[in-house]
C-alpha cells in the first residue's frame, strides 16, 4: 500500500482550503508542526462529519514554550467569547407569539317568551354567548394595581372581562357597587392575621359594600412548600393554633363577611363569573374616592358629608370602641362617629355613666339602641 505525504501551510485567510484538501485526500494521520486553534477546529469539523473514518491527529510543541502560551491564550479568548455570546443571547429581545384570544364573558339576559299571547308576559333567563351582540360592551371589573403580581387579573381578561386597573384603598376587586373582594394568598393571610390588618380591611369593606368577600387563594407552589409554619396546611404547632384562633375570631367578629377558599386562580375566576352574572357595573370614580382613613356616608350629596370634607381632619374615636359598639349593640359605624363627635361623650366610661340618659342618646342614635345601651349600663350583674 502506497503512503502519500502531503505538506501544506494553514493560513487564516484561507479557512476553507484545509477543509477542501481534507475532503479530497481523506488522510488517516495529520501532524501539526505549528499549533493553530483555527486549524484544530477545522479538523474537528471534518472528523465530526466523517465519524466512520479513522483519523489521528498529532502536533509538535515544546513544553512551556512561547507557542504553548500563545495556544493557551487563544483557548482562553475563545472561552470568553462564548461566555459573552451566551450573555448577549440571554438579553436579546425575541419576538414571541402570545395567545390573545378572549372568551365571551357569561351573562344572563332577560327575554320575553313568545308563548304568552295577550296574557301577563313572562321572563326567561338564558346564556346568550352565541347570540350576544358584537358591539355589546364587556363586563367590567375594577382591580387594584398591586394585584397584577398575581395571575388572577390575566385570567379574568382572557375570560372576557374588561379589567380596569386603578389604585383603590378598600378592597382588591370591585365587581359591582355592592360587591367587593379582598384576595389573600396563604402567606399574606398569615401575616395579615398577625398584624391585625385584615380586621381593618374587612371592617372598611363592610362599611361601604353590602357584600364583602374574603377570598383565600392557594396555588401550586403551596402544595410542596410550607408557608409561614403552615397554619392552614394542617400543622399542629402552637404558632399555627394561634393563627387559626385569630382567623376564627375574624369570622365571629364579622358575621356579615363571606369567606371563600379557592384552590387556584382559575377557580377564583370561575367564582368571580358567578358573582358577576347580571350584576350592575361598578363605578370607578366611587371606588377610587373611598379612602381607608376616613368614614364617609354612603348617601351621595348629603350636606353632612360635604361639610366634613371641607373641615379636613377631625377627631375620631378609637377603632376598638367603634368595633365594640357595632358588634355588641348593632350600631353602624356612622352612628358611632356621630355620637362621639357631636355629643359630650368621648369614652366608653362616659357612655355607660349614670348621668347619660336614654333621651340624650336618642338624639344621635336610634331610640331602641339607646335603650339597650342604657339597660346594659344600669343592669346589676351581681344578681344571680
Image: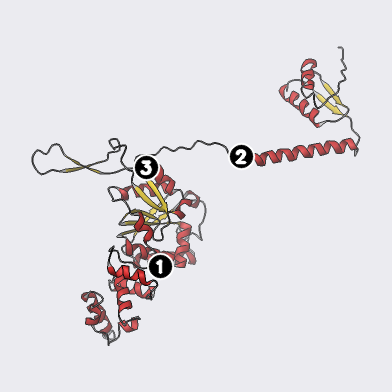
Q: Position of residue 262 (x, y in %)?
A: 40, 52
Element assignment for label 2:
loop
Q: Is residue 363 left or right of residue 235?
A: left
Decide which of 70, 191 is in the foreground and name it.
70
The location of residue 298, given as percent across then percent down, is 29, 64
Q: Secondary structure at mark 1?
A: loop
* Image position of 367 with respect to 37: above or below: below
Q: Is residue 233 visible?
A: no
Residue 71 rendering spot, x and y as whole percentages: 84, 35
- Given residues 186 and 83, the one toward you in this image is 83
Depicted 242 relative to depicted 24: above or below: below
Tag 1 or tag 3, which sits nearer the N-term?
3
Q: Secondary structure at mark 3?
A: loop
**Nearer to the camera, 361 or 127:** 361
Q: How far separated are the C-alphas under marks 3 and 1?
A: 34 Å
Cα separation, mark 1 vs mark 2, equals 46 Å
Q: Quadrant of residue 8?
A: top right
Locate residue 216: give its quadrant.
Answer: bottom left
Report the residue at 21% width, 81% height from top: 359
Q: Look at the numbered discs 3 and 1 and tell me whether their residues touch, using CB distance below 8 Å.
A: no
| Image quarter in which the N terminus is found | top right
Residue located beneath label 3 in the image: 160
Image location (x, y in percent) of residue 316? 37, 75
- The residue that label 2 is drawn on is 92
Name the image quarter holding the C terminus.
Answer: bottom left
Distance of mark 3 from mark 2, alpha carbons? 32 Å
Question: Crowdedness of circle 1 by 10 Å Cα count: few (<14), some, many (20+)?
Answer: few
The first of marks 1 and 2 along the sequence is 2
Q: Residue at 38% of width from left, 52% of height from top?
A: 142
User: Which label's residue is closer to the chain start, 3 or 2?
Assistant: 2
The residue under label 1 is 293
Amino acid at each position: 500500500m502506497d503512503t502519500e505525504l502531503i505538506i501544506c501551510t494553514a493560513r487564516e485567510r484561507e479557512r476553507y482550503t484545509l477543509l477542501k484538501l481534507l475532503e479530497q485526500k481523506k488522510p488517516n494521520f495529520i501532524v501539526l508542526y505549528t499549533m493553530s486553534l483555527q486549524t484544530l477546529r477545522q479538523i474537528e469539523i471534518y472528523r465530526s462529519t466523517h465519524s466512520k473514518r479513522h483519523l489521528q491527529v498529532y502536533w509538535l510543541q515544546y513544553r512551556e514554550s512561547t507557542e504553548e502560551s500563545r495556544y493557551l491564550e487563544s483557548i482562553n479568548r475563545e472561552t470568553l467569547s462564548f461566555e459573552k455570546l451566551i450573555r448577549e443571547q440571554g438579553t436579546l429581545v425575541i419576538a414571541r407569539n402570545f395567545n390573545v384570544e378572549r372568551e365571551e364573558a357569561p351573562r344572563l339576559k332577560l327575554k320575553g317568551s313568545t308563548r304568552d299571547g295577550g296574557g301577563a308576559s313572562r321572563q326567561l333567563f338564558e346564556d346568550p354567548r352565541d347570540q350576544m351582540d358584537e358591539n355589546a360592551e364587556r363586563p367590567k371589573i375594577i382591580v387594584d394595581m398591586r394585584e397584577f403580581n398575581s395571575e388572577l387579573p390575566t385570567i379574568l381578561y382572557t375570560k372576557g372581562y374588561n379589567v380596569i386597573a386603578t389604585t383603590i384603598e378598600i378592597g382588591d376587586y370591585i365587581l359591582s357597587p355592592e360587591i367587593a373582594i379582598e384576595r389573600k394568598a396563604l402567606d399574606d393571610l398569615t401575616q395579615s392575621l398577625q398584624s391585625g390588618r385584615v380586621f381593618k380591611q374587612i371592617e372598611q369593606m363592610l362599611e361601604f359594600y353590602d357584600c364583602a368577600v374574603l377570598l383565600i387563594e392557594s396555588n401550586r407552589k403551596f402544595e410542596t412548600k410550607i408557608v409561614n409554619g403552615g397554619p392552614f396546611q394542617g400543622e399542629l404547632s402552637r404558632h399555627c393554633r394561634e393563627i387559626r384562633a385569630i382567623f376564627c375570631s375574624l369570622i365571629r367578629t364579622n358575621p356579615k363577611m363571606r369567606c371563600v377558599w379557592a384552590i387556584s386562580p382559575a377557580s377564583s375566576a370561575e367564582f368571580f363569573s358567578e358573582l358577576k352574572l347580571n350584576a350592575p357595573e361598578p363605578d370607578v370614580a366611587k371606588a377610587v374616592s373611598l379612602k381607608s382613613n376616613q368614614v364617609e356616608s354612603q348617601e351621595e350629596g348629603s350636606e353632612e358629608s360635604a361639610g366634613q370634607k371641607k373641615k379636613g381632619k377631625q377627631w375620631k374615636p378609637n377603632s376598638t370602641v367603634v368595633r365594640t359598639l357595632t358588634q355588641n349593640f348593632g350600631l353602624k359605624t356612622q352612628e358611632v362617629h356621630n355620637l362621639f363627635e357631636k355629643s359630650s361623650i368621648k369614652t366608653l366610661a362616659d357612655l355607660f355613666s349614670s348621668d347619660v340618659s336614654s333621651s340624650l342618646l336618642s338624639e344621635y342614635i336610634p331610640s331602641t339602641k339607646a335603650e339597650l345601651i342604657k339597660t346594659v349600663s344600669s343592669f346589676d350583674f351581681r344578681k344571680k
